[in-house]
Image (cartoon, helix red, strand yellow):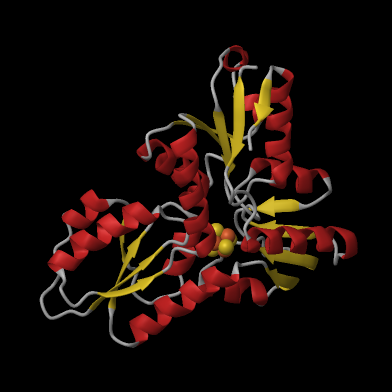
Amino acid sequence: MRGKIYLAEKRGFCSGVERAVKMVAQAVENGPFPVRVLHEIVHNENVVNDFAARGVCFYDTPDPEWKGGCLILSAHGVGKKLEEYVRSMSVEVMDATCPLVKKLHAAAAELESEGYTLLMAGKRVHRETEGVIGRVQYPPVVFENAAESQAFEPVPGKRYAVISQTTLSTDEYETILSVLRKKIPDLHVAGGICQATTSRQTAVKKLAEKCKRILVIGSTKSSNSKRLREVAESAGAEAVLISDVSGLPDSFFETSGDIGITSGASAPEYLVDDLIRKLQSYGWVLGD
Ligand code: SF4
């Protein structure tokens, strides 16, 4: 035996991804055709490629020439103007935006209408952040990490509220908040990180107590998958993010020692099963 395989208690598809994937699968069955998706439905190449092989077309921007068929908005959501534009087109729009992302859109707009200047913890180049920015009149100041919040200089007399991308690391968010609270004593904290993100990060920390090597299955484009790798590393494990089992070199299977496995919220469980099967074929066994 080379070692044991331990699985994170919480991993893989979250409710928002389940919902979005189901919406595309239903459109593939029932139309209206052609089935188009604006942006990647979720950040996972395997999911996108599987749907593309079934005739679904993915686009970065809408085409004014589209007539008929449907257009599905991705789980990450879009800004208000873009949504209004596609709804004015001659296509049936289906909205796969995660309800928790929509809640964040609503919170951002409400806070702004109450007179707050918005701050946001998150990644600038991410569909979700872009969608949130597109829901307010004045773009929030975005902090990707604590160092950036450290450099922020609040304007005296302004009322600030902070929101977060749903898939941020909870530890990173807490660090950003502690920096901001020192600078802005009356900071209004509105949150944003979803339960699926929190529970997967807690589970990978627990996994890191058992195994010093952790494999995270997920796309390099997936924010929550990247955060899982970072959280595992912060917890002391050696963590690798791979899109699927093919991402591991042959030499990996010649090693030994216990291995922990988790997967991002947009990674299908069959990718975990494929990895387990390959590890088992090289002599690892499933732990309790
Ligand atoms: S990670 Fe959270 S916010 Fe994002 S799709 Fe899943 S449940 Fe929704």
Q: Residue at x 85, y 62 (%)?
A: 33
User: Residue 256, image x and y in percent?
Assistant: 56, 16
Q: Residue at x 63, y 38 (%)?
A: 288
User: Residue 188, image x and y in percent?
Assistant: 27, 77
User: Residue 253, image x and y in percent?
Assistant: 62, 16
Q: Decide if residue 264 is on the left or right side of residue 190.
A: right
Q: Decide if residue 159 is on the left or right side of residue 157.
A: right
- Residue 184: image quadrant is bottom left
- The residue closer to the viewer here, 234 or 177, is 234
User: Which image quarter has ligand 1?
Assistant: bottom right
- Residue 216: image quadrant is top right
Q: Quadrant of the N terminus?
A: top right
Above or below 11: residue 287: above
Image label count: 0
Above or below 251: residue 232: below
For this orientation, the residue located farthest to the left is 156
User: Residue 132, image x and y in percent?
Assistant: 45, 68
For this orientation, the residue located farthest to the right is 30
For this orientation, the residue located farthest to the front is 288
Q: Residue at x 80, y 58 (%)?
A: 25
Q: Decide if residue 271 is on the left or right side of residue 201.
A: right
Q: Residue at x 63, y 33 (%)?
A: 287
The answer to whether residue 220 shows anywhere in this view is yes
The answer to whether residue 81 shows anywhere in this view is no
